[in-house]
Amino acid sequence: VWGSSESDVYAVGEGGFIAHFDGADWSPVTSPTSETLTGIWGSTFDQYVAVGEGGTILSYDGANWTDVTPVPAPKDLSAVWGSGPEDIYAIGKGGTIVHYNGISWLPLESPTAATLRGIWGSSAENIYAVGEHGTILHYNGTTWTKMDSGSHDSLISTFGTLNPRVMVVGHDGVILTLQGPSIQGRICDSCTGLGIGDVLVEFDKGLPQPPYQSDTTNSY
């Protein structure tokens, strides 16, 4: 789900499904694909990008959705985020990272083979991607590098603020808070009554803070 305002929200899903919310009602939108869509992002009301299985990439121009999947297509894509309409990243299966530069979608070198599930950034020089096996990647505007998350759980989604303060959630109730360009913390896997999937770890300016128990062991 992504929206430019409370009266302009899009949701995507199975079989290429796209729906739009106008502030009052949801209505289906004509989709150019039957592939399952797994992620959507937009910069303005007339510039959205959706991604999904089969490496599908769709673009919305304010009037119509168009299939802009490159040839050859990338592997299955999970999520998409951009710092602007000419700087967009999509991530997915096997560590896939593709970038849109305003002209075309191009594959980028990835430091992992783990499937990536979520992506968010505070700027073009500070982007995080998360995925299976506790994978967290950071992009500094030049290079993607792998970070030590302290977790082996599958990480599903990430979002943050402009501070930047970044939240990461995953399977078994895992919640990580990242603050700063690196992680220097740990999951408390020896606390009485707590497991690796029941812990909130806070990272404040690179210093590990006490772990806190999550109130769920559900997957996100």
Image (cartoon, rainbow, N blue to C red):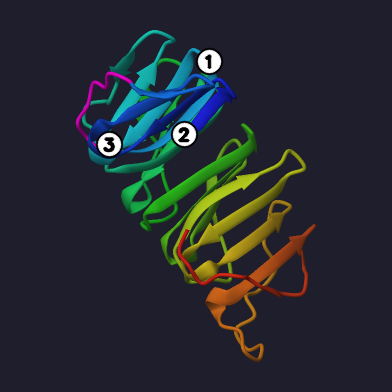
Residue at the disc numbered 1: 45
Q: Of 16 and 112, which appears nearest the observer?
A: 16
Q: Is residue 170 above or below residue 16?
A: below
Q: Which mark is on residue 177?
A: none
Q: What main secondary structure does the magenta stretch of the protein show? A: loop
Point out residue 220 in the picture as x, y percentages from the top left corner. Answer: 47, 58
Q: Amino acid at mark 1?
A: Phe
Q: Of 174 and 127, which appears nearest the observer?
A: 174
- Residue at 27 percent of width and 26 percent of height: 69
From the viewer's perspective, is 174 left or right of 183? left
Callout 3: 10 Å neighbours few (<14), some, many (20+)?
many
Q: Is residue 210 above or below residue 14?
A: below
- Residue at 73 percent of width and 54 percent of height: 179
Magenta region: 29-36
Callout 1: 10 Å neighbours few (<14), some, many (20+)?
some
Look at discs 1 and 2 and give the one toward the viewer: 1
Q: Secondary structure at mark 2?
A: strand
> Real-space Cα distance between discs 1 and 2?
19 Å
Label 3 or label 1, whichever comes before in sequence order: 1
Q: Amino acid at mark 2?
A: Tyr
Point out residue 153 in the picture as x, y percentages from the top left corner. Answer: 47, 69
Q: Is residue 220 magenta?
A: no
Q: Is residue 102 above or below residue 176?
A: above
Label 1 or label 2, whichever comes before in sequence order: 1
Look at discs 3 and 1 and give the one toward the viewer: 1
Residue at the disc numbered 2: 89
- Residue at 19 percent of width and 31 percent of height: 34
